[in-house]
Amino acid sequence: MDTLERIHLSIIQEVEKQGSMTAAADVLCLTQSALSHSIKKLEQQLGTDIWLREGRSLRLTQAGQYLLAIAKRVLPQLALAEERLRQFAQGERGTLRIGMECHPCYQWLLKVVAPYLAAWPDVDVDVKQKFQFGGIGALFAYEIDLLVTPDPLYKPGLYFEPVFDYEQVLVVSKQHPLARKAFIEPSDLTSEVLITYPVAIERLDIYNLFLLPAGVGPKRHKTIETTDILLQMVASGRGVSALPRWLVEEYASKLDVVAVKLGKQGVAKQIFLGVRESERGIDYLAAFIQQAKQFAEFHTRLQ
């Protein structure tokens, strides 16, 4: 019997993604008859159906669902292997693909990337923000090489390095009554409009570490995707927000905003860089983590 081939996995994945054999054939540059013949032959060799026809639509069988799961895991790894080998053949070191699971970390990342690119001229950096809140899966699927996150999820095969300590604070307009307080109590926010990034509440520190333990919530919760607009809204008195202190201090010179401590003890957080355990030894990846830690140490000395 012939072995399962890459084209079979590609066909199964594309038919599921595109919704029909015709559309999948177009994407894969195959004729529909060639695609159908390839799968029919595979079904005969495996002795089981991959799809069942339901009217004009196709439904994956249990065997088909299993192969689809294999395709989603294996095909990205094969694509990455081919890209890495192409880079080696051309004398390149590779591309470091960074996934962001931290909205305000983008400004921090820019300051780390600049000296890194200067030190590693034969390595490209690609930042993928679409993985902002699904980064663990992206690491496992080989869609990114490094994940920037304040909330590591420790799983076998992954390694997380803490690189930057920071304090989560409430940011308010300079004219806001809360700006004069030494620290904020959870009850202070019950009459406020809380502005956050568009993230599920269970992933927001202001809720998890401050409001929910006290059993209270804001008057209203609204979301804004970009940091600049979010802080403009806060500066104009349209609401309050929770952000890293270092980010608020950067904007304080340009906008009328101030940082106020969340609770008497404050809310301490860290930024972690996550990688696949098996790739910790790759030199340019390890160098990026080291660069991030050095920047953090330098930033801490300046404070």
Image (tube, grey):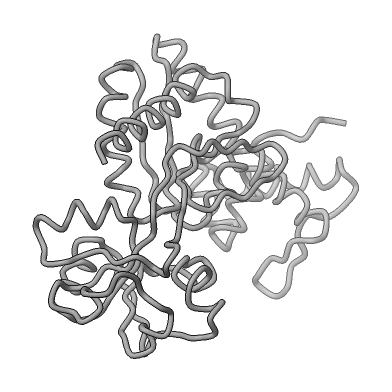
Closer-to-camera residue (186/92): 186
Quarter residue 291 falls in: top left
Residue 135: percent from left, percent from top: 52, 50
Q: As drawn, which residue projects farthest toward the right?
A: 47
The answer to whether residue 51 is above or below residue 109 is below
Residue 202: percent from left, percent from top: 54, 71
Number of marks present in the image shown: 0
The answer to whether residue 149 is above or below residue 17 is above
Residue positioned 44% across, 70% down in the render: 206
Closer-to-camera residue (168/58): 168
Closer-to-camera residue (235/263): 263
Residue positioned 66% across, 43% down in the render: 73
Q: Quadrant of the N terminus?
A: top right
Q: Quadrant of the C terminus?
A: top left
Quarter residue 241 falls in: bottom left
Residue 117: percent from left, percent from top: 29, 23
Residue 126: percent from left, percent from top: 36, 36
Q: As drawn, which residue projects farthest toward the left?
A: 254
Left or right of 70 in this view: 119: left
The answer to whether residue 282 is above or below residue 100 is above
Residue positioned 47% across, 25% down in the render: 285
